Image: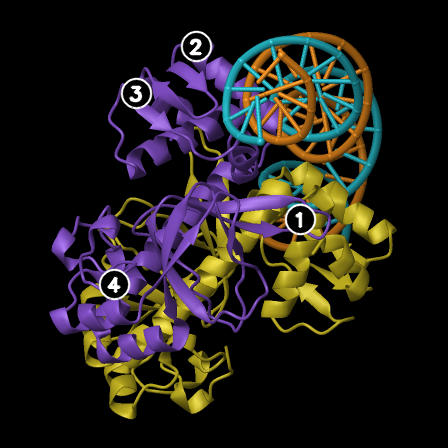
Chain colours: A purple, B yellow, C orange, D cyan
Amino acid sequence: MERLDKRETVCCGASVACESCAVRPLAVCGALPTDALARLARMTHPRRLGPGATLIEEGEPALDVFTVVEGMLKLYKLMPDGRRQITGFMIPGDFVGLSVGEAYIYSAEAVMPTTACRFRRNFFHGMMEDYPDLETRLLGIVSTELAAAQGQMLLLGRKTAKERLASFLLSLAGRLEVAAGDRLALPMTRSDIADFLGLTIETVSRTFTVLRKEGLLARVDKAGVVVADIDALARAAGD
Amino acid sequence: MERLDKRETVCCGASVACESCAVRPLAVCGALPTDALARLARMTHPRRLGPGATLIEEGEPALDVFTVVEGMLKLYKLMPDGRRQITGFMIPGDFVGLSVGEAYIYSAEAVMPTTACRFRRNFFHGMMEDYPDLETRLLGIVSTELAAAQGQMLLLGRKTAKERLASFLLSLAGRLEVAAGDRLALPMTRSDIADFLGLTIETVSRTFTVLRKEGLLARVDKAGVVVADIDALARAAGD
DNA sequence: CGTGTTATTGAAGAACGTCAAGCGGGGTGG
DNA sequence: CCACCCCGCTTGACGTTCTTCAATAACACG
C-alpha cells in the first residue's frame, strides 16, 4: 500500500489537514476527490483516549467506524473465564470497527494515549455508495488485514515461543518503519504481547532474555528493544 | 448472509443455472442484475479437482480468483521445514484466491472431489468496476472471513484441545447446516483437522475419543461424527 | 521515600508432542 | 474369493515445551 500525501489526509478536526493529525496519512482516504475528503472531514469526530481506555466493546451495537490518527489500539476477544486473545495492534492509518453484523466482534482499547477519528457507520456506508473508490480502498484494507490474520494463525498454530516473538518484533518494526539498529518502542505491556502471541507473560519475558543473550537483541527493557541482528531475527522468525 | 435463489446462481458452465452447479448458490453473485450474471457466466471456467489436487499455490502469480461450487477446499500456509497451518476449509459458495499483492498468499487443495469456477482476476476487477454491488458483496465476504479468522486466532492462541475440537465441529455443523442428531461428514483427514486446530493427529484422535466417552458425540469414525449433545458441545467449545 | 504495579527469574507441574506399536478398512492381485 | 498390503486412525509410554506458582527485582507515581 503506497504512501499517501499528507495533503490528502482527513483527520480528527474539521479541516482536511489539521496539524496534530497529519502525523500519519489515513490509508482509507487515498485516491478520493477533494469534495469527498471535505465531506469526510466535516463528519469526523475526534476522540482522545488515555491508556487503557476502551474505544469499542465486543457485542455492542456497531454504530461507528474509526481510524487511528495517533497512538496505538489493541483489538481483542475475551472468553467468559477471562482468557484473552489480542488479534491486532492498530497504528495510525489503520481502520477499526468494521463489522458485517449489527454488533462489534471485538473490543478495542488504547495501549497508549491515542486519537481516533469516529465516523457514523451509516454515513460511512453512504460515502461508499457515493465514492466507489472508497469501497475499493476499504476492500484492499480488509484483504490486507485478512492476510495478516492468516499469518497470525500460522504463528499461533505452529510456531515456537521464540519464533513468535521474533515474528512479532519484525512485523512491528516493519509497520512502524523502524530501521535496523534503532530502538523499537513497545508501548504495550508484556501481558498484551503474551495475549497477542498466545503465550504467558513469563514465557514472553524468558524469550526476550534468550533473544538478548543470543545477540539478536542488543537491549531489552520494559518500553522497547534495540534490534542488533535483523537478519538473525528474520531467521529466528521461521519464515 | 441470506440464502439466494437458485436462479441467481452463476456456476461452472456457460449457463446461468446449469444443473450440476446449482447445488449451492454463489454468495458473491447475490443482488446482481441479469446482464452481470450473464457476463460472469460467459467468463467462467469450471475446474474439476480430485482429492489432493492443488488449485493454487502460495507465492504463485495471482492471476485467477475462484468460487467453490461443489466439494471442499483446504487453504494452508507452509513453513520451510514443512509445518503447516490450514487457515480454512472452503465450501460451496465460498470465494478463494483474493490477493492484494501479485502473488497468492496461501495454497489451496481439494479435500474431496471438488468443482471450482475460475475467473480471470482482471476480468473480475472489471466486473467490480461495472457493478459496484459486486464489490460491496465481496467486501462483506472478506469482512466475514476476517471475523472468522479472528475467532480462529482465539482458538489457536487460547483454547485447549477439547475446546478447539468442539469449536471446529460446531462451526462446521453450522456452515453445512447439519441438524442436531444428524451425521456431520468430515471429508478431511485427521492430519488436516490437526493442522487447522494447531494440534497433532494423535491429540485430535485422543480428543475425539474423549468427546465420545463423555457423551457429546454419539459416534466417531474416519469420515464423520454424530453429535449427541449439541448444547454440551457448545459449552465445551468455551464461548 | 514508600507503595503498588509490572517485569524477571526459578522450580515444579500439566498439556500436548513425539515415538512406537497395533488396528482396521479399502483396494489389489494372486 | 480371499490374502495381502497400504494408509490412515487409534492407543500407549515417554519427553518437551510451555504454564503455573512463587519469590524477587525494577520501575512509576504520589
- In the rendering, at what x and y percent does residue A31 appear? 15, 63
Q: Secondary structure at mark 2?
A: loop
Query: First in sequence: mark 2 or mark 3?
Result: 2
Quick check: can you spot residue B34?
Answer: yes
| Furthest residue toward right | B214
- Disc number placed over residue B164 in the picture, else none: 1
Q: Residues within 10 Å of mark 4 (few under 14, many from 20)?
A: some
Q: Chain of mark 4?
A: A
**Circle 3/circle 4 CB separation < 8 Å:** no
| Residue position for label 2 | A214
Give the image quarter of residue A228.
Answer: top left
Query: First in sequence: mark 4 or mark 2?
Result: 4
Q: Secondary structure at mark 1?
A: helix
Q: CA distance from mark 4 to mark 1?
A: 34 Å
Residue shown at the point (69%, 46%) measured from the top left: A82
Residue shown at the point (49%, 69%) measured from the top left: A62
- Disc number placed over residue A137 in the picture, else none: 4
Q: Chain of mark 1?
A: B
- Disc number placed over residue A231 in the picture, else none: 3
Residue shown at the point (50%, 66%) measured from the top left: B91
Relative horizontal placement of residue A142, taking residue B223 as reference (left or right):
left
Callouts 3 and 4 on one subunit: yes
The mark closer to the camera, 1 or 2, is 2
Q: CA distance from mark 2 to mark 3?
A: 13 Å
Give the image quarter of residue A184.
Answer: top left
Q: CA distance from mark 3 to mark 1?
A: 35 Å
Q: Chain of mark 3?
A: A
Q: Secondary structure at mark 3?
A: helix
